[in-house]
Amino acid sequence: MNSRYDAASAAMVFTTTHLSAFAVAAPSHRFGDLQRVAWANDAIDAMAARDVIRGVSETRYEPHAEVTRADFIALLVRALELRGSGSATVAFSDVSSSAYYYDELAIASELGIARGTGDGRFEPTLAISRQDVMTLVQRALAAADRELPAGGSLDRFADQAEVAAYARESAAALVAAGIVQGVGDGKLEPR
């Protein structure tokens, strides 16, 4: 059962299908390889406790590893608690039904979030680009009925011409919403 903390009411909020006694508990995840990213420990622990992230093992997170397309889709679907019909399948030729991210990718595909890289492929093991992150986040927020402002602009970024055509609208919407602010030096580094 997923839940969330509602700061306005200072309470944990969840949906149930039956009346029972409930207790709030959170599993403790302590990855042993976070010393060099101490600033991120609390966020990583909180996301691991909610099963948004899982690490590469029970004790290792590998915070400096590149994030793959598969890992990002899994994280995004879990973080937003997106649900599909339960009968969706993945039509990408390079994704096995036994893949650890299969269920999340099926949901993302059904909701129109994940559309692949072309030729019926998803390329799950490729490192995800910033422009793909922006595109997937915008689509996921729309699927979760969290619309972003329209009409944003990328003009303030020196490398805005490097943003692929398919990602421009998503990137502009995330910039307008204040979710994306660039990497410094007036750049987005989309690729």
Image (tube, rainbow, N blue to C red):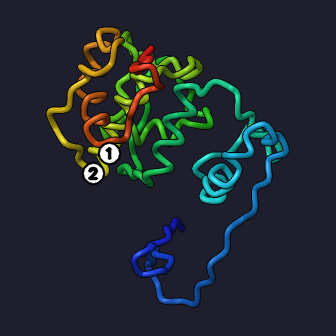
Sequence order check: which comes first, mark 2 or mark 1?
A: 1
Going by the numbered disc 1, the residue's amino acid type is Leu
Quadrant placement of the C terminus = top left
Residue at 56% x, 19% y is 127
Q: Please tell me which residue lies in front, 133 or 39.
A: 39
Going by the numbered disc 2, the residue's amino acid type is Arg
**Residue to which mark 2 is pinned:** 146
Q: Quadrant of residue 17?
A: bottom left
The 10 Å Cα crowd at callout 2, few under 14, some 14 to 19, many 20 or more, is few
Q: Decide: is 163 above or below 112.
A: above
Q: Decide: is 114 above or below 79.
A: above
Q: Please tell me which residue lies in front, 57 or 167.
A: 167
Q: Position of residue 118 (x, y in %)?
A: 36, 12
**Residue to which mark 1 is pinned:** 141
Q: Of all residues shown, which one is farthest toward the left?
A: 151
Q: Position of residue 79 (x, y in %)?
A: 49, 50
Q: Position of residue 28 (x, y in %)?
A: 75, 62
Q: Decide: is 144 above or below 166.
A: below
